[in-house]
Image (cartoon, helix red, strand yellow):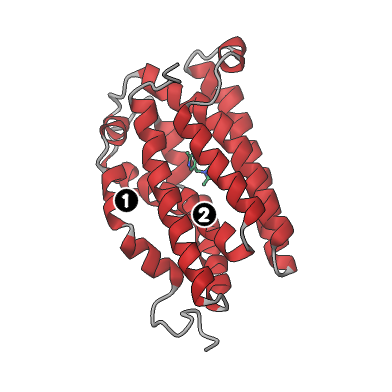
Amino acid sequence: MNDATNGSGATFSAAAWQANLPVFEAIRTMAFNEQLAQGTLPADRFKHYMIQDAHYLIAFGRALAIAAAKADDADGLVQFSEAAKVAVIVERSLHTDFFRSFGVAPAEFDGTEMSPACHHYTSFLIGTAHAEPYAVVLAALLPCFWIYAEIGRDILARAVRPNPYDAWIDTYAGEDFHEAVRAVIATTDRAAATASPQVRARMHEAYKRASQLEWMFWDSAWRLASWPV
Ligand SMILES: Cc1ncc(C[n+]2csc(CCO)c2C)c(N)n1
């Protein structure tokens, strides 16, 4: 039983993608993403998204660094420490380029705390990264990569150009990003192949929860959500 399927006949990634297709479809058809593709998304909703994403990316980088520390070989250590660095680089480009072009002043970012959805998602990722075995940590991190790659491609295919959100679309539809995503899928499948049925079940739970939290993150930006009290 040393294939990538753990004897079940399907890779973890194929099974998880299939099981969570309704969540992906719900994300793909959100008004936020449809209007982003059309270029008609109101700037205040995109600003909310960007500010929360800057918070998210730093926490995501920390979760990746914990995954790197838990890696079961040197390749995983390099892969996830590099990804942690990329998350911070993307956050810095949000700060220097996107914040400037969409008029987010440093004081506005500093004065905006994490929304409930961002807080929930980042707490889930950091908590999972600390508490769970490597394979489950990877399953929790995977939707962030994979959903963005597929949403990026989908938006690119129907985008109206030029579009105020061109730079965002190009980041996630680009081949560099897709190559990194394929590598994360492959590492997650390798970890799943030697995982016990119990750990594999926890991987599916973590993958599902992260996918749902992706939807909630976009929904929160659409609603311009903040803390109710
Ligand atoms: C809510 C939210 N989810 C996923 C991503 C995409 N993403 C963020 S960091 C990273 C990998 C960089 O190492 C990827 C793919 C995002 N930006 N915001």
Which residue bears the numbered disc 1?
A: 24
| Residue 222 location, quadrant | top left
Q: Which residue corresponds to the image point at 75% horizontal and 67% vertical from the top-left?
A: 74
Left or right: where 103 falls relative to 62: left
Amino acid type of the residue tagged 2 in the rendering:
Ala
| Residue 170 location, quadrant | top left
Left or right: where 81 falls relative to 29: right
Structural distance between the alpha carbons of marks 1 and 2: 15 Å
Q: Which residue corresponds to the image point at 31% horizontal and 50% vertical from the top-left?
A: 23
Query: Which of pointers 1 and 2 indicates the residue nearer the eye?
Result: 2
When the figure is inspected, residue 24 is found, relative to residue 196, above or below; the finding is above
How dense is the environment of label 1, judged by Cα within 10 Å: few (below 14), some, or many (20 and up)? many
Q: Is residue 83 something that shows in the picture?
A: no
Percent from the top left, x then y, of residue 55? Answer: 57, 30
Q: Secondary structure at mark 2?
A: helix
Q: Which residue corresponds to the image point at 58% horizontal and 57% vertical from the top-left?
A: 137
Q: Which residue corresponds to the image point at 27% horizontal and 37% vertical from the top-left?
A: 30
Which residue bears the numbered disc 2?
A: 140
Percent from the top left, x then y, of residue 211? Answer: 40, 49
Left or right: where 5 falls relative to 108: left
When the figure is inspected, residue 148 is found, relative to residue 161, above or below; the finding is below
Instruction: Tell me the quarter of the image containing the C terminus.
Output: top left
